[in-house]
Image (tube, rainbow, N blue to C red):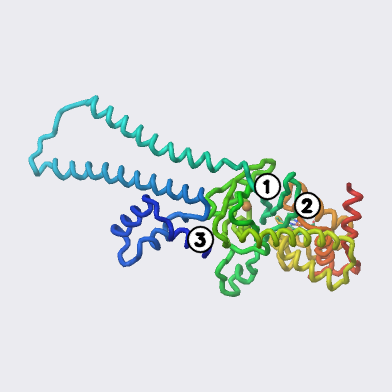
Amino acid sequence: MRAKNSSSASANRTTAASTLGQTLLGALLAVGVSAPSWADRFNMPVGVTDISRQVYDLHMLIFYICCVIGGGVFGVMIWSMLHHRKSHGVEPATWHESTKVELAWTIIPVFILIGMAVPATKVLVQMYDTGGEDMAIEVRGYQWKWEYKYLDDDRNKAFGFMSNLSTPQDEIQEVTAKGEHYLLEVDEPLRIPVNRKVRFLVTSNDVIHAWWVPDFGIKRDAVPGMMNDLWAIVEEPGIYRGQCTELCGKDHGFMPIVVEAMPEDEYDAWYESRKILAKEQEKLASMNFTHEELMEQGAEVYSKYCASCHQENGKGIPPVFPALDGSAIATGPVDDHIGIILNGKPGSAMQAFSSQLRPDEIGAVTHYERHAWGNNTDDIVQPIDVVNLMNKEG
Ligand code: HEC
Ligand SMILES: [Cu+2]
């Protein structure tokens, strides 16, 4: 799950805590296995941001404190049991209550706890210091995908897109072998520049999700109606992968996060071209397409956005997810069909796609559903039909 590029950062780490730890672990446990690889396999990742390294160091520090306390307590216990055993002829002591000992076992732990709380609080305060950012991105969870909106200086959307799982169904159904990034790959990753402070504003459109990229060291819940935020300054270009970490329904394990950190100049060039692409995609709403074009794009949209519930074969999973093959709506009046896709069905898993898909995508997927499987209406649905209905509904 770790990105390739992030391992170099972890290899370079030579803080006192981790060096001591690796020596200890190596000496104690890793017979024939080098210490860093042993630690890497079972330990949390060091990550690629300053915060993630501080979190790692904190984790190791507390871990060693626990080791020392554990060793001390069990050492004294085992030593006492061995040296005071009956076969040595030890007579049990008869004293009761020692104010000195009681004071010691109260005061020493208090200092240990304070000693752990101070560095922990310092890291926590930094984690929440999301201000002074160079750029902001809104992250919105959906069942079951993420939307990323790049916000300009006035917090308006410059452009945005959906990031969908791209692992082929064949791998999921075990028809073909699983790829290297099985369930951790998307059609369009979130791109960010290195060395700039990025503030992520995290929210959700439906249920609670959580946005987590382990290498960044911070995780936030995506709660409908609330904005939580987190930040990252990534130092190493690379691809970092994460997952939704709040059980959010049937496809919770199918909404990965992929972030590509790019060198600054490359990022700036990409940003400009992506903004232009978004403008061009808007124009598609006023274009006309042939039946074949609509079917092709419709199939693509359907398999990305609809098949998880209604299934590739249009048979759904009744009674929860209705079949579209032969459905009265998918073969009835066009406006009703477009309407349910635009607005969803409140109270059901059928979400409103008006804010997720462009009119040309909704037009194509409507057309597709009316001509795929056993459905065969002889109409053609164009993006303009979607736009007209949206305008009519206001
Ligand atoms: C998260 C699951 C889910 C996804 C994803 C989903 N739907 Fe649905 N859909 C439903 C449910 C549930 C209903 C039934 C709603 C009701 O009537 O209570 C439904 C109903 C429908 C209906 C009406 C069918 C009928 O006969 O009642 C259409 C048409 C439809 N969906 C199209 C789509 C399209 C197009 C997409 C993709 C852009 C899509 N759905 C994605 C869950 C989903
Ligand atoms: Cu989720």
> Could you classify mark 3 by the number of other residues whose Cα lies within 10 Å: few (under 14), some (14-19), or many (20 or more)?
many
- Residue at the image point whose x is 70% and y is 48% from the top: 205
Seen in the picture, residue 288 relative to 19 is either above or below; the reply is below
Mark 1 vs mark 3: in front: 3
Spatial separation of the CA atoms under disc 2 and disc 1: 13 Å
156 vs 79, nearest the viewer: 156
User: Which sits earlier in the primary sequence, circle 1 or circle 3?
Assistant: 3
When asked about the image quadrant of residue 275, the answer is bottom right
The residue at 82%/64% (across/down) is 364
293 or 233: nearer the eye? Answer: 233
The three-letter amino acid code for the residue at tag 2 is Ser
Callout 2 touching callout 3 (CB < 8 Å): no
Residue count near mark 1 (Cα–Cα under 10 Å), binned few <14, some 14–19, many ≥20: many
Q: What element carries label 2?
A: loop
Write down the residue under mark 2.
355
* Structural crowding at the residue carrying mark 2, measured as other residues with C-alpha within 10 Å and reported as few (<14), some (14–19) or many (≥20): few
Q: Name the element at disc 3.
A: helix
Q: In which quarter of the image is residue 297?
A: bottom right
Which residue is the site of mark 3?
Answer: 6
At mark 1, the secondary structure is: strand
Q: Name the residue beneath numbered marker 1.
A: 204
Looking at marks 2 and 1 on the same chain, the residue that comes earlier in the sequence is marked by 1
Q: Which residue lies furthest to the left in this view?
A: 89
Residue 94: x %, y % from top left: 15, 29
The residue under label 3 is which amino acid type?
Answer: Ser
